[in-house]
Image (cartoon, coloured by chain):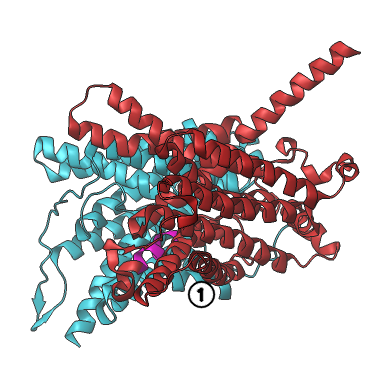
Chain colours: A cyan, B red
């Protein structure tokens, strides 16, 4: 029972990060109809910037803030410099370009920092507090939950209640009409990329210390898990991404706790295949006919 | 946006060989391909006697990569399915060959027929894996397919650690390969033998692929890529065609991986990482999607670019640590950058540029004559 509680909490904490990362994927998918395969690499780049800043100043929080700013900027730059110029006639073109970005970013990181694991620090202890003799939550888990909670509700509030959110939704839903109504569609797209990349950077900052450490490939498996989470929830649904993230986090935690951590990658693949074969649109997708 | 995964927008799509009526006048496709394969084979033998052993080994590596890139060209270029998992399929082929060769060696079996048998087993096992992924892939489109194959690329190499009892984890397995047959003489260079082996296997695979592309199946592949609904109306079983394309492509990827393992005489998960899958895709895109010649350019690039950057970093005087970082990562950076630039500026790839250039020259020549 103790073990089950521990695994559940651990899974929810990991799942919260997957949820944030999946949410970033969904943001870009809704805005630009592109699955940003470079998101993991972009997030790692932001985390490396934070590492440099923290190492230079000795302050974790300064690095944390810089990582998010770097993520926002990187997203805007990737949209303006690269993605804007890709021919979107075929859905494969942006995917291939994003993969080129993955190679480029990881190689540049490798050249600057070297291809070895670097320790990543946490601002709070990761040893669990005990409640009534049962190890439950670590302060770091609480920090993760709080941060992700703030970000998710902040995004939900922004899209539902603010003029900017309304413009972003309009620009994604009907670009031509929005342009006629005076919405800066290109700007909204860039803003969407920046936001998604910022959320991705935040997720990377939260998840990297809990894994092996900072490495150019540190987010490869996290990206696959988050993609699975986004697909479980349906690529079009932000609440679905959050639920999907928690589901994937729990599943991975149980698999690694009860069956061995070597099996977690396989579990992700099986879950992804199962969801896509049974409900390709995700668990929360409305029934839709394929457009021709 | 069309539902099919056509990679190139129509205006960039080259006139494909099978589409030209002129081709029908040139006699049997099979005989023509056989003749080309024979000439290329003889050329390879001639080259293998003139260049130094290291170049022989490099050419053999090009041949092994060519197997995989040619298969990926058929899948992505002709059938419109994107696979980021071909590095993993190569790993399946490589590990199968390692297990087979080790099993033969343990039982003390020798003979020239063992290696072809192992290669055959590698193809069979990759076909089995490819069929499973292909059945899933046939139901998926665009980014979903990319995501699943990406997961395959990340997960399959990790299995070597999961089942380290058989696959020996990160260390990998060694691949015992017999020396060249005694009939070739006592001083026959090993690298030349490697080139002969991989060259022969790759030529055979390419011959089969080239014929497949020109056949009814090749036309159904293209029809499904261009418009699934029209293909279905024309009586083509879309899902079956897609699975077939995936299986064919997986078989060549498996052979390519097996050949690489035979060349390196070892396999380890590190050699078949996600980066390899991205490399293959990049090679195919830069070479020119949908043409086997493009696959050749891509395979050459995969071997030549790291070699070039190695020479370049040796020219610069750098500290060993910096040189090591540059050497491992500079080719990756160049590959990535090239991939982005090619996709944005020249979606036809190298082969597309070459044929455009050739056509322009031909036009000018015929204009001058008239």
Magenta-colored span: B152-159
Residue drawn 59% across and 70% down?
A: B131
* Quadrant in the picture for residue A248: bottom left
Left or right: A150 as drawn, with respect to B179: left
Residue beneath disc 1: A274
Q: Nearer the viewer, residue B318 or B179?
A: B179
Placement of A181 over or under A32, stated as above or below: above
Mark 1 element type: helix
| Residue at (17, 51) in percent of width and height | A120
Magenta segment includes B155: yes
| Residue A271 percent across, percent down from the top left | 45, 73
Task: Decide which of B236, A24 is in the foreground and name it.
Answer: B236
Q: Is residue A237 above or below residue A136?
A: above
* Residue B104 drawn at (x, y percent): 41, 73
Residue B36, given in percent of the width and then of the height, sits at: 71, 43
**B313, above or below B343, in the image:** above
Numbered-mark total: 1
Residue B192 among those drawn in magenta = no
Is residue A69 visible in this depiction of the protein?
no
Magenta highlight: main SS:
helix
Q: What crowding class fits label 1: few (fewer than 14 Cα within 10 Å), some (14-19), or many (20 or more)?
A: some
Q: Is residue A115 visible?
A: yes
* Chain ID of residue with mark 1: A
* A237 horizontally vs B229: left or right: left
Quadrant where the image shows the C terminus of chain B: top right
Q: Work out which residue is located at the far bottom of the displayed protein and give it.
A: A1
- Residue occupying image coordinates x 87% and y 46%: B27
Residue shown at the point (71%, 58%) measured from the top left:
A291
Depth check, front residue: B290 or B107 = B107
- Left or right: where does residue A127 sit relative to residue B213? left
């Amino acid at each position: 029972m103790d073990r089950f509680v521990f695994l559940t909490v651990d899974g929810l904490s990991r799942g919260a990060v997957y949820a944030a990362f999946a949410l970033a994927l969904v943001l870009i998918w809704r805005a630009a109809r592109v699955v940003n395969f470079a998101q993991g690499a972009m997030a790692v780049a932001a985390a490396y910037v934070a590492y440099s800043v923290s190492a230079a100043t000795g302050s974790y929080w300064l690095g944390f803030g810089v990582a998010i700013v770097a993520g926002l900027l990187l997203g805007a730059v990737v949209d303006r410099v690269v993605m804007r110029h890709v021919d979107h006639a075929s859905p494969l073109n942006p995917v291939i370009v994003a993969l080129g970005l993955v190679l480029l970013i990881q190689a540049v990181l490798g050249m600057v920092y070297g291809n070895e694991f670097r320790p990543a620090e946490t601002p709070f202890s990761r040893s669990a507090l005990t409640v009534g003799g049962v190890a439950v939550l670590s302060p770091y888990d609480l920090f993760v939950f709080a941060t992700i909670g703030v970000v998710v509700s902040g995004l939900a509030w922004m899209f539902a209640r603010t003029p900017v959110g309304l413009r972003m939704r309009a620009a994604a839903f009907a670009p031509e009409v929005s342009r006629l109504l005076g919405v800066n569609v290109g700007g909204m797209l860039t803003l969407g990329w920046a936001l998604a990349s910022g959320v991705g950077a935040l997720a990377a900052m939260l998840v990297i210390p809990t894994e092996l450490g900072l490495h150019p490939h540190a987010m490869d498996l996290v990206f696959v898990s988050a993609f699975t989470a986004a697909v479980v929830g349906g690529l079009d649904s932000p609440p679905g991404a959050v639920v999907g993230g928690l589901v994937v986090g729990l599943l991975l935690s149980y698999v690694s706790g009860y069956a061995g951590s070597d099996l977690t990658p396989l579990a992700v693949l099986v879950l992804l295949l199962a969801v896509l074969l049974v409900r390709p649109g995700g668990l929360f997708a409305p029934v839709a006919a394929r457009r021709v | 946006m069309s539902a099919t995964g056509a990679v190139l927008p129509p205006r960039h799509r080259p006139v494909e060989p099978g589409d030209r009526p002129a081709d029908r006048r040139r006699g049997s496709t099979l005989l023509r391909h056989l003749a080309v394969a024979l000439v290329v084979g003889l050329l390879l033998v001639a080259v293998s006697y003139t260049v130094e052993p290291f170049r022989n080994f490099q050419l053999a590596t090009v041949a092994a990569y060519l197997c995989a890139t040619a298969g990926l060209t058929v899948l992505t270029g002709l059938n419109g399915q994107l696979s980021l998992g071909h590095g993993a399929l190569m790993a399946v082929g490589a590990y199968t060959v390692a297990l087979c060769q080790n099993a033969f060696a343990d039982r003390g079996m020798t003979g020239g027929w063992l290696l072809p048998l192992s290669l055959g087993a590698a193809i069979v096992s990759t076909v089995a894996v490819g069929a499973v992924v292909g059945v899933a892939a046939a139901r998926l489109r665009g980014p979903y397919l990319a995501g699943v194959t990406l997961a395959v690329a990340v997960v399959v190499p990790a299995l070597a650690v999961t089942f380290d009892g058989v696959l020996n984890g990160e260390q990998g397995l060694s691949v015992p390969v017999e020396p060249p047959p005694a009939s070739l003489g006592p001083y026959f260079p090993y690298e030349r033998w490697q080139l002969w082996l991989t060259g022969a296997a790759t030529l055979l695979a390419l011959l089969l692929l080239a014929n497949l592309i020109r056949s009814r199946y090749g036309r159904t592949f293209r029809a499904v890529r261009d418009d699934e609904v029209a293909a279905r109306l024309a009586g083509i079983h879309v899902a079956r065609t897609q699975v077939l394309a995936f299986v064919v492509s997986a078989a060549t990827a498996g052979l390519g991986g097996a050949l690489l393992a035979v060349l390196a005489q070892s396999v380890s998960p590190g050699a078949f990482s996600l980066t390899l899958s991205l490399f293959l895709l990049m090679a195919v895109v830069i070479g020119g999607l949908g043409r086997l010649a493009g696959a050749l350019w891509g395979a050459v690039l995969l071997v030549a670019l790291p070699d070039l950057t190695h020479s370049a970093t040796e020219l610069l005087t750098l500290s060993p640590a910096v040189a090591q970082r540059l050497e491992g990562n500079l080719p990756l950076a160049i590959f990535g950058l090239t991939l982005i630039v090619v996709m944005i500026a020249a979606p036809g790839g190298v082969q597309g540029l070459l044929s455009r250039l050739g056509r322009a020259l031909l036009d000018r020549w015929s204009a001058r004559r008239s």
